[in-house]
Image (tube, rainbow, N blue to C red):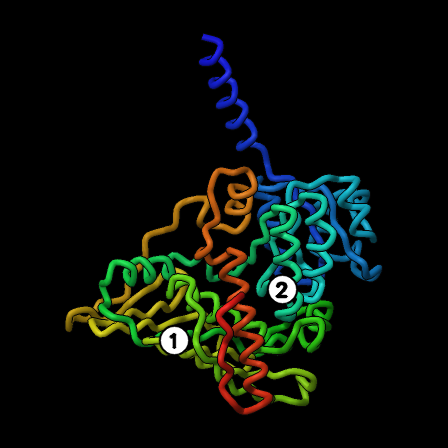
């Protein structure tokens, strides 16, 4: 009887914990995707217990100002972590800052989710991974496209063999340019810096295709990477590339990634080709294609179930142990280390004009 009571009590406590918002700290406020935290806060998925920003110009001038008490804004990251003790930290500063965030959080046992990509360089990403593994924390990477029902539908069809043997994947991501679409100055200051961001369009949008290709191909890394990086608008982006074409060569699949700040309109779409047909993922919901000689008119893919439909619901479920993050998952450390290897090879390829052969180890 006592054992039954303890099991019941444990179940009740687990349910009560699950119902509570996730206690999160926010590291950096200069990323224009910070609005995602505001939405999660308003939706009750999270409680923001502390915010860190080193730049005095922005510490009380950001999307969270007025939504989080002034007393919870800090100029020192370690002080914010020690005084507020978040369950997880979400990083919304420069990509270069991701390493410092993990260096502060990992020894304290605090889980981390960063905005894509994992790091500004492969060297930084490997340091972050070593810390996450040493201290046993989750280190997740958030992409907008992870929560697209259309992408999940395409992968399911691939896994079920509905397209036959895959031989080609074309992924296109980008927009007219961050300056052209009106990104904030605080965002542009680091997004267009080769050190703080790691590169231009190759990093900002090349990571999407690398992430999706690694996922579709069940965690495999390409054998070779070849890339061409261009500056079509050097007067606007003098320090970084604004257009990247990356080709990944696998044993039996070729992946082409078109990442650009020069597209005439915003896009995050993908073609997946097999010997038995193809699918075109056009929007977060819409898919069309051809299978067994018959065209598939455009339709809406089935909606994703919670918590796989939203980054903060996913983070909460992972931190609370309600789901397990698998090595092939889009947000996983393993996937995103492969992404960083691909981006590093793409940059080296563009510099040398030669294809880069990847080593087998991460």
Is 265 placed left or right of 230 in the picture?
left
Q: Position of residue 216 (x, y in %)?
A: 38, 64
Q: Residue 3, how many percent across, how many down? A: 47, 13
Q: Residues within 10 Å of mark 2 (few under 14, many from 20)?
A: many
Residue at 42% across, 58% down: 148
Cα distance in 3D space between marks 1 and 2? 23 Å
Question: Is 75 left, or right, of 107 in this rendering?
Answer: right
Toward the left, the furthest residue is: 293
Query: At 44% from the left edge and 81% from the top edge, which residue is drawn?
Result: 247
| Between 151 and 131, the one nearer to me in the picture | 131
Image quarter where the N terminus lies is top left
Q: Residue 264: in sight, yes or no?
A: no
Examine the rendering and report whether any part of residue 354 can be seen.
yes
Relative to 231, does residue 308 appear above or below in the rendering? above
Q: Position of residue 258 (x, y in %)?
A: 46, 79
Vertical side of 184 occupied by 314: above or below: above
Indicate whether 337 appears above or below 309: below
Image quarter of residue 167? bottom left
Mark identifier at residue 308: none
In front here: 12 or 284? Answer: 12
Determine whether the residue tagged by mark 2 lies in a helix, strand or loop. Answer: helix
Q: Which mark is residue 250?
A: 1
Q: Position of residue 116 (x, y in %)?
A: 57, 63
Lateral position of residue 149 relative to residue 298, left or right: right
N-terminal of the pair, mark 1 or mark 2, is 2
Asked whether disc 1 touches disc 2, contact meaning CB atoms under 8 Å apart, the reply is no
Quadrant the C terminus occupies: bottom right
Residue occupying image coordinates x 53% and y 79%? 260
The residue to which callout 2 is attached is 125
Bin the neighbour count of mark 1 within 10 Å (Cα to Cα): few under 14, some 14-19, many 20 and up: some
Count of numbered circles on the image? 2
């Amino acid at each position: 009887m006592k054992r039954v009571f303890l099991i019941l009590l444990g179940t009740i406590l687990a349910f009560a914990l699950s119902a509570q918002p996730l206690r999160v700290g926010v590291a950096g406020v200069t990323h224009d995707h910070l609005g995602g935290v505001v939405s999660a806060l308003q939706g009750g998925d999270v409680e923001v217990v502390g915010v860190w920003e080193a730049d005095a110009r922005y510490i009380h001038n950001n999307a969270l100002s007025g939504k989080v008490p002034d007393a919870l804004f800090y100029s020192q990251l370690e002080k914010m972590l020690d005084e507020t003790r978040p369950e997880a930290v979400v990083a919304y500063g420069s990509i270069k800052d991701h390493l410092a965030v993990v260096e502060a959080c990992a020894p304290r046992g605090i889980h981390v989710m960063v905005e894509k990509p994992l790091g500004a360089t492969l060297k930084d990403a490997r340091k972050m991974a070593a810390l996450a593994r040493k201290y046993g924390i989750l280190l997740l990477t958030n992409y907008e496209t992870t929560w697209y029902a259309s992408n999940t539908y395409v992968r399911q069809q691939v896994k079920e063999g509905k397209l036959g043997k895959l031989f080609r994947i074309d992924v296109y991501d980008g927009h007219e340019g961050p300056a052209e679409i009106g990104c904030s100055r605080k965002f542009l200051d680091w997004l267009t810096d080769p050190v703080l961001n790691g590169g231009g369009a190759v990093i900002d949008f090349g990571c999407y295709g690398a992430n999706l290709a690694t996922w579709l191909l069940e965690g495999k890394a390409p054998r070779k990477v070849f890339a061409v990086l261009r500056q079509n608008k050097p007067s606007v982006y003098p320090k970084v590339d604004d257009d990247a074409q990356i080709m990944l060569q696998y044993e039996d699949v070729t992946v082409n990634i078109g990442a650009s700040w020069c597209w005439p309109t915003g896009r995050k779409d993908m073609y997946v080709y097999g010997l038995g047909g193809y699918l075109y993922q056009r929007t977060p919901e819409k898919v069309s294609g051809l299978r067994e000689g018959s065209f598939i008119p455009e339709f809406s893919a089935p909606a994703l179930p919670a918590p796989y439909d939203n980054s903060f619901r996913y983070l909460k479920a992972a931190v609370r142990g309600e789901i397990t993050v698998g090595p092939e998952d889009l947000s996983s450390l393993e996937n995103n280390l492969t992404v960083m290897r691909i981006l590093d090879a793409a940059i080296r390829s563009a510099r040398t004009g030669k294809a880069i052969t990847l080593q087998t180890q991460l």
